[in-house]
Image: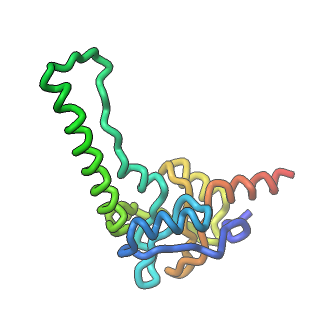
Amino acid sequence: MKIEDVMNKDVITCAPGDSLSHLANLFKENHISGLPVVDKGKVVGLVSETDLLKLFKMPQYSNELWLPSPFEIIEIPIRNLVQIEETKKNLENLKLRPVKDIMTKDVHAISPRDDLEDASSIMVKYKINRLPVIDNGKLVGIVARSDILRGLSGAMT
């Protein structure tokens, strides 16, 4: 079975200069978890929900017992309030950042005439979930792991 038999031809894309807020809305509105980044008709990157989530690294806390001094008992709530305000400000700034700041630039792609097994091998080897489908330098579709599984399961029955 070929990629063109299972690929999604209605590809949702974004531009490198689109904001992360716009990107998050595209994911939400279209019920997708990743998409190609296109500039002047050429795929220049891929971006996923994982790329967005990486921006929200949580601090690691120690499990060691800690007894605050009397001064720290007063300081800690004030410090936490300042951190909350900084976090709010950082979230607002994140929404405005461009997609190009977080997209994967090293894009693996596949041809519509390639076999499903070829796509599967690429995805496993590079630990990726989707591949843009390129024909003569033009984006013609996208294939995800679920598309491949659906195609392979149909071929087995």
Q: Foreground: 25 or 15?
A: 25
Side of 129 relative to 147 (left or right): left
Taking the spot 20% from the left edge, 25% from the top edge, the residue there is: 73
Residue 22 lies in what quarter of the image? bottom left
Is 122 rendered above or below residue 39?
above
Residue 145 lies in what quarter of the image? bottom right
Is 93 rendered above or below residue 126?
below
Taking the spot 44% from the left edge, 79% from the top edge, the residue there is: 42
Q: Foreground: 18 or 102?
A: 18
Taking the spot 29% from the left edge, 23% from the top edge, the residue there is: 62
Side of 19 relative to 111 (left or right): left
Q: Position of residue 20 (x, y in %)?
A: 40, 65
Q: Residue furthest left?
A: 71
Side of 2 relative to 100 (left or right): right
Residue 63 lies in what quarter of the image? top left
Taking the spot 33% from the left edge, 68% from the top edge, the residue there is: 96
Q: Foreground: 72 or 4?
A: 72
Is 153 rendered above or below residue 39?
above
Q: Residue furthest right?
A: 157
Q: Residue furthest bottom?
A: 40
Q: Position of residue 137 (x, y in %)?
A: 50, 80
